[in-house]
Amino acid sequence: MDPKDIEAKIVAALPDAKVTLKDLTGTKDHWEGVVVSAQFEGKNPVQRQRMVFAALAEEMKGPIHAFTFKALTPAQAAAS
């Protein structure tokens, strides 16, 4: 799956999101990423993951086999 398509799906669900992706295998189906959004404020890690995975629900059934990511607030991203 093209990284721009993954980013577009996440941004459609989290409009302020900044998404960084890395293809782990070169096959465009195993991804690692960082998603930064103010919408993660006040959310625990499980809630944040659910928000991102909800945006990619259809893609996780097929074109994406694995997706690991960090879900950070802007303040957390700036501190890291």
Image (cartoon, rainbow, N blue to C red):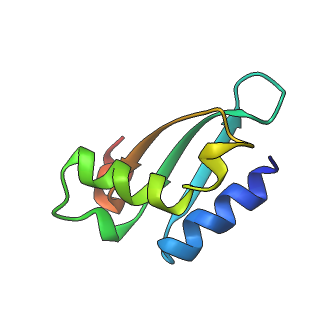
Closest to the observer, 52 or 15: 52
- Rendered position, 62 above or below 27: below
| Residue 70 position by quadrant | top left
| Residue 46 position by quadrant | top left
Closest to the observer, 37 or 63: 63
Q: Is residue 71 visible?
A: yes
Q: Give the residue displayed 56% in from the left and 63% down from the top.
A: 10
Q: Is residue 44 left or right of residue 30?
A: left
Q: Is residue 52 left or right of residue 73?
A: right
Image location (x, y in percent) of residue 15: 51, 78
Closest to the observer, 71 or 53: 53
Q: Residue furthest top?
A: 25
Q: Is residue 78 visible?
A: no
Q: Give the residue displayed 36% in from the left and 48% down from the top.
A: 49
Can you say which quadrant of the picture contains the C terminus?
A: top left
Q: Give the residue displayed 77% in from the left and 59% down from the top.
A: 4
Q: Is residue 63 left or right of residue 17?
A: right
Q: Residue furthest front?
A: 61
Q: Number of callouts in the render? A: 0
Q: Give the residue displayed 35% in from the left and 53% down from the top.
A: 50
- Rendered position, 16 above or below 43: below
Image location (x, y in percent) of residue 32: 59, 34
Image location (x, y in percent) of residue 30: 68, 30
Closest to the observer, 79 or 40: 40
| Residue 63 position by quadrant | top right
